[in-house]
Amino acid sequence: PGVPYELKAMTENFVLPYLKRRFGISAALRSRVLMVAGMGESRIDQAIGDIMRAQQNPTVGVLASPDMVRIRISARAETDDAARTLIEPVEALIRERLAGRIFGADQDTLEGALDSLL
């Protein structure tokens, strides 16, 4: 494929279904990454640490870097839709507790978020 969206479509529609059939994989793993600005990892842990410790599926993890903190919510289910359904209430709770601090999700970038504000 010549461009990323062609590769993505081929991967989702052909490669992944083939690999699942070939190796007998029946579960889907889905993640959602929230990007937080203006709070350090320890303050985020104070705000959502109980959520991180209480979850088994989905799981919640934190990754700090110099410019932001990423919160990853990952769920395993029979289908992508079912995994997303598991993620949604946890994401909503985290967004509620970190209101005004989450500036993007998944593949958003800091530059893209800033451009959208201008």
Image (cartoon, grey):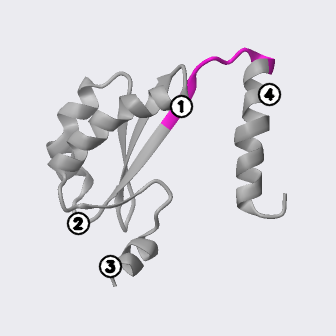
In this view, the residue in front, 54 or 19, is 19
Which residue position is annotated with label 4?
Answer: 18
Residue occupying the point 77% across, 19% down: 21
Residue closest to the far top: 24
Q: Amino acid at mark 2?
A: Gly
Residue occupying the point 16% across, 47% down: 97
Whether the residues at callouts 3 and 1 have beta carbons within 8 Å, the answer is no
Which residue position is annotated with label 1?
Answer: 80
Please tell me whether residue 52 is drawn above or below residue 39 in the rendered image: above
Question: Could you tell me how far apart the alpha carbons at marks 4 and 1 are, in whole angstroms?
Answer: 16 Å
Of discs 4 and 2, which sits in the foreground?
4
Q: Quadrant of residue 94?
A: top left
The segment highlighted magenta reads: 22-30
* x, y percent for residue 70: 38, 53
* x, y percent for residue 88: 34, 37
Question: Could you tell me how far apart the alpha carbons at marks 2 and 1 are, in whole angstroms?
Answer: 32 Å
Residue occupying the point 17% across, 47% down: 96
Which residue position is annotated with label 3?
Answer: 117
Precedes in sequence: disc 3 or disc 2: 2
Q: Amino acid at mark 4?
A: Tyr
In this view, the residue in front, 16 or 59, is 16
Which labelled disc corresponds to residue 38?
Answer: 2
